[in-house]
Amino acid sequence: MSPAVLSIWAVIGLIAGWGFHRIADRGTGVPPQVPWLQPLALFLVACIMFGTAWSTRRTIEQDPRRLSPHQAVNRLVLARACAYVGALAAGVYIGYAVSWLGVNSSDIAGQRVFRSACAGVAGILVVVGGVLLERACRVPPKDDEP
């Protein structure tokens, strides 16, 4: 997985998150808050990715035959999809948090910055878990010795 592609997804998300605050502010006058469920859901996905990466790495190191080829491909596809979506989500939430910096409105702006930043960090953890799972799916080369 190319870091450049992940960076592009993150930048697209960053621009979208920053622009979302501006558009929502003009449309309804009250931009939405980020509930705690969103960062928690991303954190749960990150935990699942880390656990699957650890399990896959362990299986391949002990006995690569226990992991069938279609299971490895499924995990690889899951890893890439989660890494891309995690990069996009991290960008959106961090962009939304940055758009609230410097806004002088009581606790609401501070809450939105903190919750969005938490969701952005959780998105980054999803990316790291996806990359680790993708690397765990690599099968070591076979030895030609008897």
Image (cartoon, grey):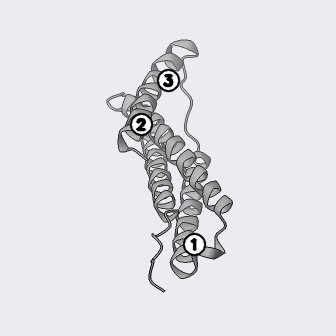
Residue under label 1, please give it.
55
Above or below: residue 91 compared with residue 127? above
What's the amino acid at mark 3?
Answer: Phe
Foreground tag (1 vs 2)? 1
Asked whether the residues under the numbered discs 3 and 1 touch, taking CB atoms below 8 Å apart as contact, a structural biologist would say: no
Q: Please tell me which residue lies in front, 62 or 131.
A: 62
How many angstroms separate mark 1 from mark 2 (CA)? Answer: 28 Å
User: Left or right of 8: which side holds 33?
Assistant: right
The residue that appears at 39% across and 44% down in the rendered structure is 2
The residue that appears at 60% across and 51% down in the rendered structure is 78
What's the amino acid at mark 1?
Answer: Ser
Mark closest to the chain's N terminus, 3 or 2:
2
**Numbered tag placed on residue 10 in the rendering:** 2
Helix or strand or loop: what does disc 1 sit on?
helix
Mark closest to the chain's N terminus, 1 or 2:
2
Helix or strand or loop: what does disc 3 sit on?
helix
Q: Position of residue 129 (x, y in %)?
A: 49, 58
Q: Position of residue 125 (x, y in %)?
A: 46, 54
How many angstroms separate mark 3 from mark 1 (CA)? Answer: 38 Å
Helix or strand or loop: what does disc 2 sit on?
helix
Foreground tag (3 vs 2)? 2
What's the amino acid at mark 2?
Answer: Ala
Residue under label 3, please give it.
20
The residue that appears at 54% across and 82% down in the rendered structure is 62
Label 1 Cα crowd, 10 Å radius (few <14 / some 14-19 / many 20+): some
Q: Please tell me which residue lies in front, 98 or 80.
A: 80
The residue that appears at 49% across and 63% down in the rendered structure is 138
User: For the view shown, which residue lies furthest in the bottom direction?
Assistant: 146
How many angstroms separate mark 3 from mark 2 (CA)? Answer: 15 Å
Q: Position of residue 141 (x, y in %)?
A: 45, 69
Label 3 Cα crowd, 10 Å radius (few <14 / some 14-19 / many 20+): some
User: For the view shown, which residue lies furthest in the left direction?
Assistant: 102
